[in-house]
């Protein structure tokens, strides 16, 4: 038996105290809360399994860089160094007994050579959550699309870092759009009559599409309408994918009070909880932090050619976020891939898509200086809709050219090289 006084890591102390097994400790010979020595050692080795990478967790490419090229990608050690230095147990009174308890599988690999362990700060090519994402997308495509508890469990885990224990979203991922701030909408038109129709009734013609006419979009399936906007007019024009010679009408809407968005461009600001190797979810949380960055790219990516199911995953994510956080925010903000992520897209939940028939009049320079409500009489009219069309915001465009930007490489291998591999090789990003 070993008591909680004879271990230093707080997590191990809590484990022993939770057993509430009063007995004499074989190390300090005193009575106290104890646990069987073998149980403690097994727990420590389980933490090694969960939080330390092995050869199976690295790709052949990474193993080649380490062993053949001598690259200093990650720290490499045997189980003795892992336990003594990485877990900092060298000075624990039970360390020699712990090493004697280590089984052969921690000492030798399948080839009979010394087994190596690798530090994992989540920058390895194989990410735990990437594999879970593939399982998630495969399940909703081919197994259970509408009632899928495994998909919900996955999304619960992925977005757990966005909120505090009470369920409230963390402030760093919430963007507020206030009255007079602009959200842009655009639509291609075939002729003068179509453009005139928008000019006469922009709040309906640039508003939410009727349910029976709503097509499958990045965030919404057939039959469910949501309002897709952009924070910049140029981004809006790019996102509708007009071609040279098209006629386009764009306009701006603004909140009648304010709306709040879950800003997916800020996910990288979310820090994982402060954990150590002694916490079960240490490695998991690091992988999740890295995965959140790639998730934004997955959500922003356009539908693949001839792949009618490619939007299923993002539609499920949108519906999940709508149900989970719809009482706190009115929609999502995410980067625009059509602008090389320089612009920002917005998609509003259906509940927040109503546009008032009463246009919003921006304050003039004098009102801006004095405050827009300084001389205005109280307005008894209370808008039910959350949005209003901004008067005089309509613009009429003829598309004269579409600019294509691309990174150019000299070798085919560079074309298909991931950003992670570029980072590992010290090469510039595209």
Image: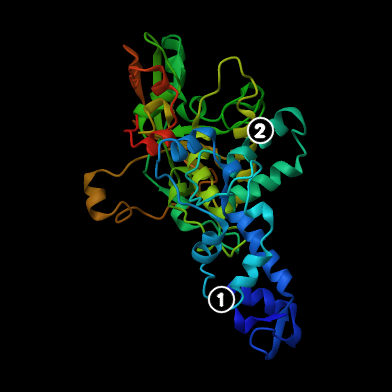
User: In the image, residue 227 lies at what x, y percent?
Assistant: 53, 33
Residue beneath disc 2: 137
Residue beneath disc 1: 92
Nearer the camera: disc 2 or disc 1 = 1
Residue 284 versus residue 61 in the image, above or below: below
Q: Residues within 10 Å of mark 1 (few under 14, many from 20)?
A: some
Q: Is residue 226 visible?
A: yes
Give me the C-alpha separation between circle 2 and circle 1. 46 Å
User: In the image, residue 210 lies at what x, y percent?
Assistant: 61, 26
Q: Residue at image x 50%, y 24%?
A: 205
Relative to 228, 223 lies left or right: right
Relative to 68, 214 lies left or right: right
Which type of secondary structure does the marked residue at label 1 adopt?
Answer: loop
The C terminus lies in quadrant:
top left
Residue 121 versus residue 389 in the image, above or below: below
Question: Which label sits on residue 111?
Answer: none
């Amino acid at each position: 038996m070993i008591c909680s006084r004879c271990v230093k890591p707080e997590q191990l102390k809590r484990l022993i105290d939770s057993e509430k097994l009063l007995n004499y400790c074989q190390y300090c010979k005193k009575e106290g809360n104890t646990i069987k020595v073998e149980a403690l050692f097994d727990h420590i080795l389980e933490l090694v399994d969960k939080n330390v990478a092995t050869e199976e967790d690295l790709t052949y490419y990474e193993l080649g860089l380490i062993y053949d090229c001598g690259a200093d990608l990650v720290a490499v050690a045997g189980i003795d160094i892992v336990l003594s230095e990485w877990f900092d147990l060298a000075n624990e009174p039970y360390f020699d007994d712990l090493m004697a308890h280590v089984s052969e599988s921690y000492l030798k690999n399948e080839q009979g050579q010394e087994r190596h362990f690798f530090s994992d700060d989540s920058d390895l090519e194989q990410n735990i959550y990437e594999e879970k994402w593939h399982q998630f997308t495969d399940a909703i495509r081919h197994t259970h699309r509408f009632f899928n508890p495994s998909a919900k469990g996955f999304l619960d885990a992925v977005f757990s870092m966005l909120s505090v224990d009470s369920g409230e979203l963390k402030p760093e991922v919430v963007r507020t759009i206030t009255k007079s701030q602009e959200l842009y909408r655009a639509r291609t038109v075939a002729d003068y009559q179509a453009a005139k129709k928008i000019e006469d009734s922009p709040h309906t013609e640039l508003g939410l599409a009727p349910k029976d006419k709503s097509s499958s979009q990045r965030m919404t399936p057939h039959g469910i309408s949501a309002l897709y906007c952009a924070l910049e007019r140029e981004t809006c024009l790019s996102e509708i994918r007009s071609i040279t010679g098209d006629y386009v009408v764009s306009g701006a809407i603004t909140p009648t009070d304010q709306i709040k968005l879950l800003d997916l461009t800020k996910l990288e600001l979310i820090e994982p909880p402060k954990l150590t190797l002694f916490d079960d979810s240490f490695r998991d949380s690091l992988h999740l932090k890295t995965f959140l960055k790639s998730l934004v790219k997955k959500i922003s990516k356009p539908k693949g050619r001839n792949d009618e199911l490619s939007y299923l995953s993002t539609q499920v994510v949108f519906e999940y976020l709508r149900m989970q956080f719809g009482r706190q925010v009115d929609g999502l903000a995410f980067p625009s891939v059509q602008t090389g992520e320089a612009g920002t897209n917005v998609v509003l939940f259906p509940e927040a898509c109503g546009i008032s028939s009463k246009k919003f009049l921006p304050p003039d320079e004098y009102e801006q200086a004095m405050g827009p409500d300084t001389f205005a009489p109280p307005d008894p009219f209370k808008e039910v809709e959350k949005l209003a069309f901004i008067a005089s915001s309509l613009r009429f465009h003829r598309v004269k050219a579409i600019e294509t930007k691309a990174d150019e490489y000299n070798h085919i291998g560079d074309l298909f090289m991931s950003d992670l591999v570029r980072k590992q090789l010290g090469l510039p990003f595209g």
